[in-house]
Amino acid sequence: MTLCARRPSPLRPTPWLAAFIAGWGLALSPIAQAGQGKLLLTGGVSSIDGAAGGGLTPWALTGSSATEGEIGATASLTRARTQDYGFTSQAVAATWSDRVEVSLAHQRFDTGPTGPALGLPGLVLQQDILGLKWHVAGDAVLDSDTWQPQWALGAEFKRTDAGGLAPTLASLGARTHGTDLYLSVTKLLLAQGVLLNGTLRATQANQNGLLGFGGTAQRRPRLQPEVSAAWLLHRTLAVGAEYRAKPDNLNPSALGAGLREDDWKDLFVAWAPSRRASLTLAWVDLGRIVPAVVSRRQTGAYVSLQLAL
Amino acid sequence: MSQPLMTRPAPCAAAPTFRTPIRTPIRTPLRTIRAWVLPLWLGVIGGWGACSPALAADAGSPPALAAVPAADPALYLALGADPGLNALVSDFIARLQADARTAPFFAKSDLSRLKTQLVSQLCAVSGGPCRYAGGDMKTVHSAMDIRKGDFNALVEVLQQSLSARDVPFAVQNRLLARLAPMHRDIINTGGASE
């Protein structure tokens, strides 16, 4: 691999997000009406990677209020702020007949004090993610007399633009493209009002892809578990927790343990005043991010607003 | 705070090579949890689903998850027994007729008969001293095209009635959990159930 410090062409998400929404609307508007048939909050919320789920992990549920025979779409804006870093994710998702979900997300990670420390003031890491999810079988909500969960298979195609940091990542063996594949199982224990999700993800992503994919010491995808549990307090309100394991491909690297990464966790409250909107507030623990520069754990607030068609 | 540890390579500089470091696994409790407990949990959830007899196609009546058949009257009492159910069903039928999503399905219903049957059905389902004497769900609904969205709309209307009657959310969910499996017989369009 050559190590040209040639900057990759900047990602331009807004036009294709807009085109995606417009195209989806044009293609499907004559076929069916926007769905309203799902029970409240049973489409989850938008995850940072765009797929419907919790905040950090995808669930087997498809997004929006669309159920069988209906189409639906969501748009979301998520902002997280930790001691040293800022993170924004804009995402749109479209679902068809509670069977297939297509999502697009654009992420921006503001590196705070780490950029200047690396000689790259104002460094922002950006990533685009195309997500596909196929609801294979089961109904997480209505099959309340069996343990049969809802199953889904998903893929997330990720492309990252690390700006001025790209040459360094390349020299560490990290690529700019990566694909995550996952299997999710979701079950709502309706009588107890408890939702459980488990996701097994095959991934090479470093810090979810924001620091590229793989490293000199670790090239192959690794299986990582992610679990979520939510408790429905009210028809419109859920509280829960998530845990997302991540590979640690850049540890050790040429920088020793300086790029070590930790698993992610969160505690969340999701509120859906109507089927058109939901608001999620969370406390997130993103562990250490580039401890070579900033050694403390990154914890902070997370806010996500989702609108549904 | 700290010195720059990484420097920006010059354009098209020769690629530095790094030797593959030897990976020394660090066994912390957290790593152990990651390595064993979480996958195990996933396996249990997944395996349970996969082994569930409901997966065997055509399982006529899947096994009861809550092995609490009609014998336990706790839910029936929590719903206010006979007076509670009568009031609930009256409210429910009024809302079903008022809601544009559900009204068409009840346009031709004999309302007093519907009320009697719903009360006896909810009574039986919640563990009360009743036997549901109406027709079976599949036959009763076969004359109509009922989609999953229609079924969910009815569930929502029932939730509205339960809330209007001040039935606690946890009690509502216990009732819904006993009614939801009926979707297999009631929804009759598309791939209603796997």
Image (cartoon, grey):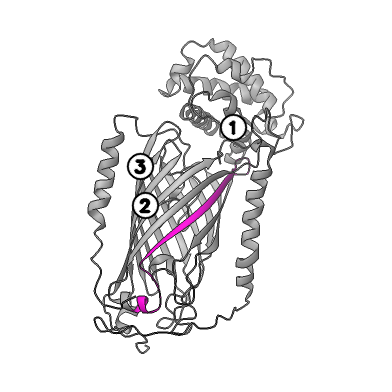
Q: Residues within 10 Å of mark 2 (few under 14, many from 20)?
A: many
Quadrant in the picture for the N terminus of chain B: bottom left
Dot 1 amino acid type: Ala
Image point (24%, 72%), residue name:
A7
**Parent chain of label 3:** A
Q: Residue furthest right?
A: B71
Left or right, B32 with reference to A8: right
Residue placed most toward the observer, A153 or B134 = A153
Image mark for residue B180: 1
Would residue A174 be counted in the magenta stretch?
Answer: yes
Determine which quarter of the picture holds residue A105: bottom left
Above or below, B123 relative to A166: above
Alpha carbon distance from label 3 to label 2: 14 Å
Above or below, B40 relative to A93: below
* Helix, strand or loop status at disc 3: strand
Give, as a single range, the part of the protein colored magenta.
Answer: A168-193
Dot 2 amino acid type: Leu
Circle count: 3
Residue placed most toward the observer, A64 or A156 = A156
Q: Position of residue A269 (x, y in %)?
A: 48, 54
Which residue is label 2 attached to?
Answer: A305
